[in-house]
Amino acid sequence: DQQVKQNSPSLSVQEGRISILNCDYTNSMFDYFLWYKKYPAEGPTFLISISSIKDKNEDGRFTVFLNKSAKHLSLHIVPSQPGDSAVYFCAAGSWYGQNFVFGPGTRLSVLP
Amino acid sequence: ETGVTQTPRHLVMGMTNKKSLKCEQHLGHNAMYWYKQSAKKPLELMFVYSLEERVENNSVPSRFSPECPNSSHLFLHLHTLQPEDSALYLCASSQDSRNTEAFFGQGTRLTVV
């Protein structure tokens, strides 16, 4: 059973619009969440994180929202740019641990 | 060079071969990791090293043997692998062993024939 799910394998968005990538988790012990971005032929790159003591964290065009009761987080990219086209992974784990469980990823395509 | 560097980028090996994957980080980090990404599956953590000591081994078969001679280098020694071990192997490092912001290498695409 997947502990971290990203139910949309792919998403297409027009340049300038908002991209919303979703992630659900099952383990209520998870208290720290990460988003990574991956371009082809490159390793994942850390994007943004959020602790369970917060429900929102913002960094420039990227905002992550956390709904603990629903065990759901989302990444908003506003405005979306063609350079944002990549695979986005969410990961969940413990602030004190090493083993973050990754989701399968969502491929975002931002169309010019 | 900066960041996390992995060699080789691609590797094809037979089931009776012995090979090693190499990872080097130039970030001054204290923790290093090996991940495996199989086709259609999420990234899976294999090994964690913190200050050159192994702190976690996620039930990885013994045909995978990690080595961390110093805080900048990490190896994954491979022997008698199976075709199902074909995958992308990613190395990562982080400032400390909490792994809350890992820097990844480009990965080694391994094919076992």
Image (cartoon, coloured by chain):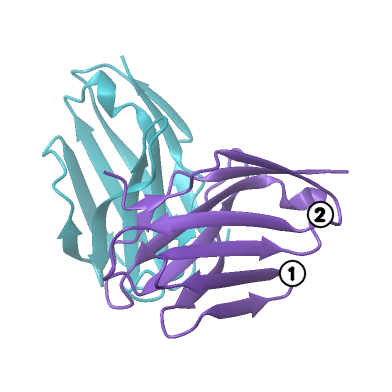
Chain colours: A purple, B cyan
Q: The residue tagged with tag 1: helix, strand or loop?
A: loop
Q: In the depicted view, which residue is nearer to us: A65 or A91?
A: A65
Is residue B64 rendered to the left or right of residue A105?
left
Q: Is residue A80 above or below residue A67?
A: above
Residue A36 at x, y = what percent?
53, 58
Question: Dot 1 falls on which chain?
Answer: A
Q: Quadrant of the N terminus of chain A?
A: top left
Q: Residue at x 21, y 18 (%)?
A: B15
Q: Residue at x 57, y 79 (%)?
A: A56
Q: Earlier in the sequence, mark 2 or mark 1?
A: 1
**At label 2, which amino acid type do we have?**
Gln
Q: The residue tagged with tag 2: helix, strand or loop?
A: loop
Tell me how far mark 2 sits from mark 1, CA to CA.
Answer: 10 Å
Q: Residues within 10 Å of mark 1 (few under 14, many from 20)?
A: few
Residue A63 at x, y = what percent?
64, 71
Q: In the depicted view, which residue is nearer to us: A63 or B3?
A: A63
Quarter holding residue B33: bottom left
- What's the mark number on residue A81? 2
Which residue is under mark 1? A61
Q: Residue at x 41, y 29 (%)?
A: B39
Residue A104 at x, y = what percent?
44, 43
Quarter holding residue A101: bottom left
Q: Are marks 2 and 1 in contact (CB under 8 Å)?
A: yes
**At label 1, which amino acid type do we have?**
Arg
